Image (spheres, rainbow, N blue to C red):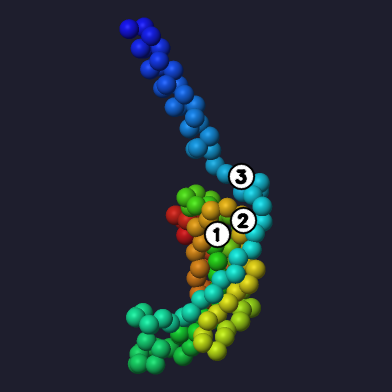
Amino acid sequence: MKLRNIIAIGLSLAALVSCSKDSEPVNVKDLKDAKVNISLKPSVPGSGLKAGGDEYALEGETNINSITVLSFSADGSQILVDPYWTEGMSTSSDDVTTVLNVPTKATNALIAILANVPANAFSGVTTYAAF
């Protein structure tokens, strides 16, 4: 009976110790810098966006004029880099907008991409939940 209790306690302690580092937050400053390239198309077949047939559409509503990119840790608990905002992007003849060299970190990430928002709209965001 004592041997069974000792084995049970040993296995319990091993399980607790093996997961002790899982809950520690990642130090973002320790992660390597990375860059991503993003391509977007403002209207795709089957979307609710009515480029030419919406009588209430505003001028330029279907155009992508600026891009904001927010990179969060995979669980959304912290932002990896400051929000990235640009008007400097290229658009091809088939309306694909490309943004090059968006800064992030080399890790699994949750990335939010927004179009046509003001430059500093998300400057105070630190978590995905706050976004």
Q: Viewed as shown, does residue 88 lie left or right of 76?
A: right
Which mark identifies residue 98? Answer: none
Question: Alpha-carbon neighbours of circle 3 within 10 Å: few (<14), some, or many (≥20)?
Answer: few
Q: CA distance from mark 1 to mark 2?
A: 8 Å
Quadrant in the rendering for residue 27:
top right
Disc 3 residue type? Asn
In the depicted structure, whether residue 107 falls above or below residue 15:
below
* Residue highlighted by disc 2: 105
Residue at image position (50%, 37%) is 22
Counting from the top left corner in percent of width and height, residue 46 is at 34, 80
Residue 119 seen anywhere in this rendered image of the structure: no
How far apart are the alpha carbons under marks 2 and 3?
Answer: 11 Å
CB-based contact (under 8 Å), mark 1 and mark 2: yes
Residue position for label 1: 71
Q: Would you name the residue on which mark 3 appears? A: 27
Residues under numbered marks 2 and 3 in contact, where contact means CB atoms less than 8 Å apart: no
x 50%, y 52%: residue: 74
Q: How many numbered marks are there? A: 3
Viewer-nearest residue: 21 or 76: 21
Find residue 100 and report its horizontal and vertical position in percent.
Answer: 63, 72
Question: Reading the chain from its start, which is encountered first: label 3 or label 1?
Answer: 3
In the rendered structure, which disc, 1 or 2, sits on the residue that comes first in sequence? 1
- Placement of 105 over or under 5, stated as above or below: below
Q: Is residue 99 above or below residue 53?
A: above
Q: Identify residue type, mark 1.
A: Ser
Between label 2 and label 3, give the one nearer the viewer: 2
**How far across and how far down the image is residue 68, in percent?**
55, 69
Residue 71 in view in this figure: yes
42 relative position to 37: left or right: left
Q: Give the CA distance from mark 3 to mark 1.
A: 15 Å
